[in-house]
Image (cartoon, rainbow, N blue to C red):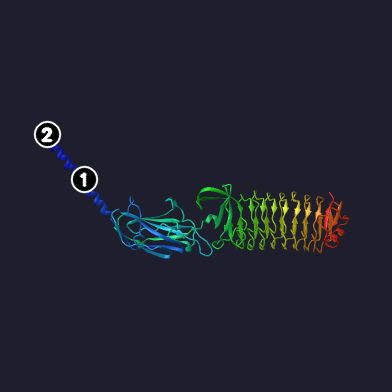
Amino acid sequence: MKSLRMKLFTGISMFVVALALLIVGVWAVGETQTITMQGSVNFEIADKSLYVKDVRMQEDVNSAPYSLKDQGKFLPGYINGNFDMNLGDFTNNYGSFALYFDIINTMDETTSETYAYTVEQPTAPSGTTVSVSILGTDGTTLEQIPQGTVKPSEISDSTLVTATIKLTIASTSSSSVDLSDITITINQYIPEVYDYFTFDINEDNQTVTLTDYNKKLSDSTDIVIPETIDLVDGIWQEGSTYTVTAIDNNATSSSNGVFFNSEITSIEFPSTLESIGEAAFRSCSELTSIDLSNCTNLTSIGDEAFRFCSGLTSITLPSSLISIGEAAFQACYGLTSISLPSSLKAIGNSAFSSCSGLTNIDLSNCTNLTSIGYMAFSGCRGLTSITLPESLASIEAYAFNSCSGLTSISLPSSLTSIGDYAFSGCDKLSSATFENTTGWYVTEFSFETSGTPVDVTNPSTNASNLTGQYLTYFWKRNV
């Protein structure tokens, strides 16, 4: 029994000694990892749209962060320029700590403009490791601080945080860290590949529409629209892939198109494009050429899409194009010629009006074209030659008004109607040949189905009648 007690006592003694050594060891390790921080965290940012609602301290990985605002060590405010955030002195024995800066990203009070931001990894002071990350409201890591949704005047205690910047500092050999040696640089996020574009996801959840182009930020005049984009939670980054199929109409608050009045000189269109919206490129006077030949899915060009693009000298259209909208190329003074595809079915009202540099129009290949719209080529004073297709059924009112350089025209056998004033102001027109000379008559009103018969066998007389005697009448042919 004595021997048993001795063994038990010896065993307990050894355990106590081992435990003591373990405690001493842990204390020793903990002591070597003691870290003290002091000074101010430096922030660098271009503007003051980021509002810091709170700063939280986490002294070790097993403890929850606590609010420095609640302890009276931090006052909410904007990060503006070179911003120093003095958090006082802290000491812990864990060798590392983390600071959480809770950010509210705001919109401009007047314009409602807002931007996303990225954060650069700071340089670590000697004897430490430092890292920065952006956390979403659910704790997941983000690539950027998302765009803001509130204005500065709307911020209150209940305003939700946009994202959190987490700063982690660990000691490798130093027992003291001067926070003033750490600079967190925040940059406005401008994705190069999307060149200041904004996209909206379409109803099919597979394609997107280009809805805005921020010309105030862009320093490039050569634009490339991507065929596909990746999107995650509203941020353009690796994720779900969407196909770009449309350029929106009247996308901006000024009720003008996406690229309205911008200084772009060239643009590369995606082959996936299906439509170009109203006024999309209106008043882009520096744009010199448009090549849509690769856009084999493009079927429509919207009203005023390229109106007032006065520097435009050449246009190449795709074989898929079906319609050209009203005033789509109006007042493109630099255009000298244009070739329209066989797929085209309609030329909208005023589509090429006031294109005074246009000298030649060849529509012979447009075997699906049935109508030339109201004032479609009105004011094309330089026009000397036009070739119409055999499919054409109607020429609307004022279609060739003031084409003062036009001397002759051949009207196809398929034609059944010519609107009033169609050739008004065509002072040099001396010959108009009707390929089908039977059944023509003129009426004072468009709704009339009978009228005064007209002999159209003489090209010279026809020209005189179209520009003079029957200028104000509607021409029709019995079919």
In the image, 427 versus 446, the foreground residue is: 446
**Where is residue 454 drawn, in percent x and y?**
88, 56
The image quadrant that residue 374 belongs to is bottom right
Pointer 2 residue: 1
Mark 1 belongs to which amino acid?
Leu
Q: Is residue 342 above or below residue 399?
A: above
Label 1 and label 2: CA atoms lie apart by: 27 Å
Q: Secondary structure at mark 2?
A: loop
Q: Is residue 439 above or below residue 80?
A: above
Residue 19 tag number: 1
In the image, 357 versus 369, the foreground residue is: 369
Q: Secondary structure at mark 1?
A: helix
Residue 446 tag number: none
**Where is residue 282 drawn, in percent x and y?**
64, 61
Q: Residues within 10 Å of mark 1 (few under 14, many from 20)?
A: few
**Residue 457 as seen in the image, left or right of residue 146:** right
Mark 2 belongs to which amino acid?
Met
In the image, 101 versus 29, the foreground residue is: 101
